[in-house]
Image (cartoon, rainbow, N blue to C red):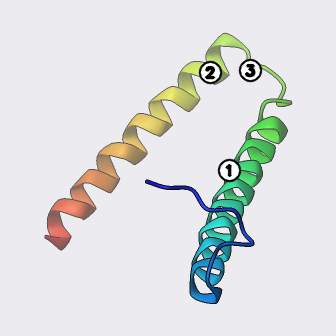
Amino acid sequence: MVVKSTTQMTKGELIALLREKERIIADLNVKIDELEGLAITSQAIPLDADSSRLLTLMNQRIRALEEQINKQQR
């Protein structure tokens, strides 16, 4: 692949390059938002052992129910 400078590109090539860069920027913005969300959740207060076990059991039950729903929808 030959890389042209922007002064050597046609108008169509410049527009295609611009769209590609805009897509990359949009993807990076989504990743930044995800990382910011993780940073916020990482500031949570740790649970005691009983609460942690209860939360784990609830999450397992939710996953099991979601799987049942997904199987019924198929």
Per the image, the residue denoted by label 3 is 47
- The quarter in which the C terminus is drawn is bottom left
- Identify the image quadrant of residue 20: bottom right
Q: Tell me: 52 left or right of 59.
A: right
In percent of the image, x 43 and y 53: which residue is there?
1
The CA distance from mark 1 to mark 3 is 28 Å
Check contact, mark 3 vs mark 2: CB within 8 A.
yes
Q: Tell me: 63 left or right of 44.
A: left
Residue 14 or 34: which is nearer the viewer?
A: 14
Relative image position of residue 59 (x, y in whole percent): 48, 38
Check contact, mark 1 vs mark 3: CB within 8 A.
no
Relative image position of residue 32 (x, y in whole percent): 76, 49
Identity of the amino acid at label 2? Ser
Q: Is residue 18 above or below residue 4?
A: below
Q: Secondary structure at mark 2?
A: helix
Q: Secondary structure at mark 3?
A: loop
Q: Is residue 30 above or below residue 50?
A: below
Mark on residue 52?
A: 2
Q: Tell me: 46 left or right of 22.
A: right
In percent of the image, x 71 and y 62: which residue is there?
25
